[in-house]
Amino acid sequence: MSDHAESDSHAENPQSCHVHIVPVKVLVGVFLALVALTVLTVEAAKFDVGSADVIVSMAIATVKASLVVFIFMHLWYDKPVNKIAFFFSIVFAAFFLCMILLDSHAYDDYVQGYQQDKAPAVTAPAAPAPVPAPTPEAPEPAKK
Amino acid sequence: MATVVDSSDPKSNYPIQYRELNYLNCSKGWKSWFFTLDHKRIGIMYLMGVTVSFFLGGLFAMLLRTELLSPAKILMGPDTYNQMFTLHGAIMTFLVIIPGVPAAIGNIILPVMLGAKDVAFPRMNLGSFYLWMFGATFFLAALVIGGLDTGWTFYTPYSVRENNASIIAALLGVFVLGFSSIFTGLNFIVTIHTMRPPGMTWFKMPLFLWALYATALIQILATPVLGITGLLLIVENVFRIGIFDPSLGGDPVLFQHFFWFYSHPAVYVMILPAMGVISEVIAVHSRKHIFGYRFIAYSSIAIAIFGFLVWGHHMFVSGQSKVVAVIFSAITFSVSIPSAIKVFNWLTTMYKGSIRFTTAMCYGLSFLFIFAIGGLTGLFLATLATDVHLHDTYFVVAHFHYVMMGSSLMGLFAAVHHWWPKISGKMFSEFWGRIACLGVFLGFNLTFFPQFMLGTRGMPRRYYTYLPEFQELHVLSSMGAYLLGISSALMVATLVYSIYRGKKAPANPWGGASLEWQCSSPPPHNNFDHPPLAGDPYVMESVVYNEEIGGFVPAECQGDNNGSGTAAGEKEV
Amino acid sequence: MNTAATTPTDEHADSHDHEHHDPRLAHHFDSHQQQFDTGKLGIWLFLVTEVLFFSGLFGFYAVYRSLHPEVFLYASQFLDTVLGAANTIVLLFSSLTMAWGVRCAQLGQTKGLLTCLVITLACAAIFLGVKSFEYTEKAHHGLLWAGMYQSPEHHEAAAVPAAAGAVESGDHGAAHADDHSDDALFEKTKHTLSYMTTVLWAVILLSGIGLAALFKNPNQKTMAAVLGCVLISAIGLQLGAYASIGYHHFGHAAEPTAQEIEMAETVPAEYAKQKEKIPEPKLAGTFFSVYFCMTGLHAIHIIGGMIAISWLIVRTVHGAFTTYYFGAVDFIGLYWHLVDLIWIYLFPLLYLIN
Ligand code: HEM
Ligand SMILES: [Cu+2]
C-alpha cells in the first residue's frame, strides 16, 4: 500500500499523509520510454501488415497507457480499492464495446438495406414524418 | 404520554429525544438553505423538487388517462398526446424516480446511518443538487417550447429531425441530470468506503446502505454512457454527424444499444434503493432481525452487476441479431434470481415477527405484493417468443408501472413515512396515512391491472385512440388513475399537515436499531455529538418501548424503570 | 474537491471538532490522511466515469471502423501524422511535468511545483494551438463531419462534374476552387487562432474571476496569477498554431519530392499509384464525424484541465499546499494523466491507419 519508502518522516502526527513519492529518475525514464514508443508506433504503421495493424498499434498504446497509469498516476502503489475501481471501468467499457460490435455486425445488412431503399430521396427528408403514434421499432427494409 | 425529553432536561437518564436547536432551525434565511452544505437540508430540497415534479408528471398522467376514457378525441389530438406521454415519462423517470430514493432520502439518511457528520464531499453534494435543478429547467424549457414527442426513450430516427429545439433541450436536461446522478453516486460510494464509524464493518451496515452502495455503483458505471449518448444525439441533431441517423449512413439500432446500456441498469437505480428501504421497513416494523442479511446484501450487488448484462431485452424486435437476443434473454432470466431472493427474505423476516401495520409498513407490504407481480411479468417479457407478441403493448406499460410506480415509488413513500419523524421531528396522523396508503394501493392496481389484460389482447402502447372493445378496461384504468392521484395528494397533505400540527416525534418512534434512530429527532446540525459506536443494526431487542416518551429507548436505560428490561445486551450506546 | 474551509457559522457546532484549528482540514474529517484518501477514491471514481463516458465514442469508432474499414483507410490519409505525433509528445511531456509537479507538492517544494504547473499549462495550450490549425485545415478542405462533408475529389477537379454516386449537395461553383490555396488556409488559421484566443481569454478570465471570488479577498497575487495563466495559455496557443503553419509550409515545399523519390525507389509504380488513389468510399464523412467528436471532446477536456491547472497555480502562488495537504494537485494531476491516456489511444486510432 502507501507506506512506501520515501514518504515524509511523520508517523503519529495527525498532520501527515502517507503517500508514495516517485523519484525523478523514474519519471524521466518513463517519459523517454513513452516517446520511444510513440516513435515506434509511427514507424510500425508504415509497414503494411494487413489487419494486424490495429492490433500492433493498440498493443503499443496499451503499453504506453499502462506506463502512465501505473507510474505517473501512482496506481501501482495505490490502494487496492482504487485499482479495482479503475480495472472495473475498463472491464465494463470492454464489455459494452464487445456487445455492440458483435451485434452491429449481425444486423448490418438491414441498415444497408434501409439506405439502399432510401437512396434516391436521401437529401430531402431528414427524418420520416412523425407518425401519429410512434411505436419505436427499427426501420425495416421492404425486401428481405 | 409523549413527554419528549428535551436537551435542557438534565435529570433524564434517557438519550436526548428532541433538541431546541436542530438542523432545521439552527440557521435561518433563504441563504442558509440555498448555500447549505448540510446533507440533510440538501436532501430536503431534493425531496421538495421531487414532489413538485411528481405532481407535474402526475398531472400529465391524469390528462392522458382522461383522453383515453373514450376512443374519440376528448382533450387533445394525437400530436399533443404524443408530447404528453413523452413528458410524463421523461419527468417521472429522470426527475422523480431516479433521484427519489437515492438523492432525496439517501442524502438525508445515509450519513446519519453511518454516524458521520456529512457526506464525503458536501460541496459536490450541493453541486449535484444544482445540476439537478439545472437539468429540470431544461425539461421545463422542452415543455414550453413544445414538440417533444419521441417517447422518453428518444429513439432515433424520431429524435433526429428538423424542428428539434425541444428535443435538444430535453437531451441537455438528460445530460445534466445524468451528471447530477453520477456525482451523488460517487459521493455515496466514497462516503461509505471512508466514513464508516468504528465498529461498523461491511456486514454490520444497514441494508439500506448496501442498496445505496449498489445503486451508486450503477450510477457511476452506467450513467456516463447515458451522458455520451445524449451528447452524441445532440451533436447529431445540431451538426448531423451520421452516427444514429440512417439517412446519413448512421445506425439507429446502435442508438438503442447505447440508450439501454444505461437505461436498463437505470431501472435498477430506481428499484435497488427502494429494496433497501423495504429491508429496513420490514425488519423494523416486524420487530425482528432481518432474515438472511448476507443474502440480501450480496443480492444487491449481484443485481447491480447482472443488471449490466441484460439491456438487449428491450431490443428483441428491433433488429438485434438472434444470437445476441438469446444471450440477453437467458441472462435476463438469471437476473430475476437475486430479486426473488430478496422477496423471500423479506417474507421470512415477517414470519413470526410482531408486525405493526403502521403506514410505512403498509407501503412496505404493498411493495411486496406489487413487486412480485411486476417482476414476474418481466419474465414473460424476457421470453423471446412471448415478447414478440407483447412488445410495445400495454402489457409492457403495465409491467414497468408495476415495478417503477408500484415498487420504486411505493418504496419512496415507505421511506418518507418511515423516516418522516426523523426528518421533520413530527409524527403524522397514522389514520390518514393508512387511508392514503389504501387509496394508493387500490388506485394503483385498478389503474394498471387492466392494462395487463389490454396488452395481452393486443392494445398497442402510445396510441391516443383504440378499438371500441377496449373501452371498458380503459375506463377502469382511468378511474384507478384518478383514485391514485387523489390518494397521493392526500398522502402529501397528511405529511404537510403534520409539520404544523403533528406531535413532537421521539428519537426512535418505531424501534429501529440502526444509528439514525440514536440521534434526536430531528438531528442536530452535526448529527452526533460523539461518533457513535455501531452494533448490529437489526437487533431489535436492544431497544424497548417507553410509555413516558412514546418511543423506544435503549434497553439498558429502561432497566432501572421497572419496564420490561429484557435487555438482550449487545447494544453498547 | 474537498478544499479546506470548514462550514462557517454554526453557533452550536460542537466543540470536539475544534481541537485542531486547521483550516486545511474539512470539518467532517478526522485526519488529513482520511481527507486525502477520501479525495483520492473520489477522483478515481470520477476517472472511472470518464472512461465510460469516452467508451461511448470508442464504441462509435469501433462499430464504424469494423463495418466500413475502407472509409477509415481512405479518410485517415487526410490527417497529418507528423502533427499528430508532435502533439502526442507535447502531451506526454505535459504529463511528465504534471507528475513531477505532484512530486514537488508532496515534498513541499513550492517553487518546483509552480514551475511544473506552468509548463504543463503551456504544453496544454500548445496542444490546442496545433489542434486549432488541424481543425482549420480540415474545414478549409471541406473535410467535415458527415452532414457537412465535401468530397475532396470534388474540388480537385472542379471542372469535372461530381461523381454520379456522390452524396453531397453539389452546388459549389468553380470559383470556390481557388479558395483552397495554402495562403488562404494560413489566413483562416490566423482567424481561427485569434478567435480561439479570444474565447480562451474569456473563459479563463471568467473562471479566474469566479475563482477569485471564492477567495476571501481577491488580492493582487491572485489577479497576477490569473493574468499569468491567461498569458501562458495565449502564448502557448500561438506557438502551437504558428509552429504547425510553419511545418505545413515547409512540408509542402519539401515533402512531395522526398516522398515521390522514396515511393519511386521502394514501391512498384502501379502499386504506388493504386495506393495514392484509394477510391472515395460512400461514407467518408463518417470518419470525420468520429474524428471531430473524439478529438473535440478530448479538447474540451483539455480546456477543463487548463482551467483546473490555472486554479492550482493560483493556489500555489498563495502557498496553499504543504507536505500534508497537496490532495488537489494530486487529483487534478490524475485527471490530467487520464486526458493524456485518452490521447494515447486516439492518436493511433485516428492518425495511423494503414
Ligand atoms: C425482475 C426482473 C425484470 C425483468 C425480467 C424485466 C424484464 C423486462 C423486459 C423483457 C422488458 C422489455 C419489454 C418490451 O419492451 O418488449 C422490460 C421493460 C421494461 N422494464 Fe422490466 N424487468 C424487470 C424488472 C424491472 C424493474 C425493477 C424495472 C424498474 C424499476 C423495470 C422497468 C422496465 C421499463 C421501464 C421497461 C420498458 C421501457 C420502455 O420500453 O419504455 N423492469 N422489462
Ligand atoms: Cu430492462
Image (cartoon, helix red, strand yellow):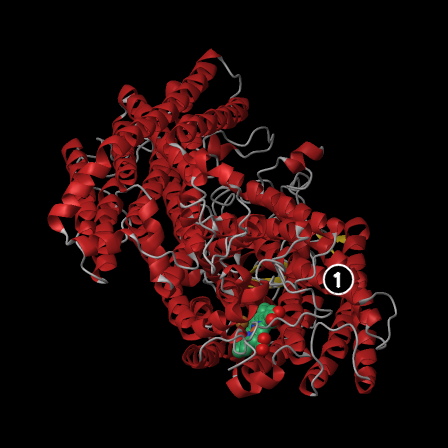
Q: Nearer the viewer, residue A142 or B235?
A: A142
SS at mark 1 in the image: helix
Q: Residue at x 79, y 71 (%)?
A: B481
* Residue B136 drawn above or below residue C94: below
Residue situated in front as seen by the camera: C264 or B326 = C264
In the picture shown, does residue C231 fall above or below A100?
Answer: above
Q: Amino acid at mark 1?
A: Met
Callout 1: CB less than 8 Å from ligand 1: no
Q: Is residue A128 above or below residue B197?
A: below
Q: Is residue B570 left or right of residue B21?
A: left
Q: Does residue B471 appear in this view?
A: yes
- The quadrant of the picture showing ligand 2 is bottom right
Judge from the rendering whether residue B187 lies leftward or rightward of residue B447; answer left or right: left
Chain designation of label 1: B
Q: Position of residue B129 (x, y in %)?
A: 60, 45
Crowd rating for badge 1 (residues with CA inside 10 Å; few <14, some 14–19, many 20+): many
Looking at the image, the residue that sits furthest to the top is C220
State the residue at coordinates (27%, 46%).
A69
Residue behind mark 1: B84
Q: Nearer the viewer, residue B81 or B332?
A: B81
What is the quadrant of residue A11 in the picture?
A: top left
Residue B446 lies, in percent from the top left, at 77, 78
Across and down, in percent, residue C132 comes to 41, 33
Q: Quadrant of residue B133?
A: top right
Residue C198 versus residue B511: which sits nearer the camera?
Answer: C198
Q: Residue furthest left?
A: C265
Quadrant of the image containing the N terminus of chain B: bottom right
Q: How many numbered circles are shown? A: 1
Is residue B44 at least partly visible in the picture?
A: no
Residue A136 position, x and y percent, is 61, 71
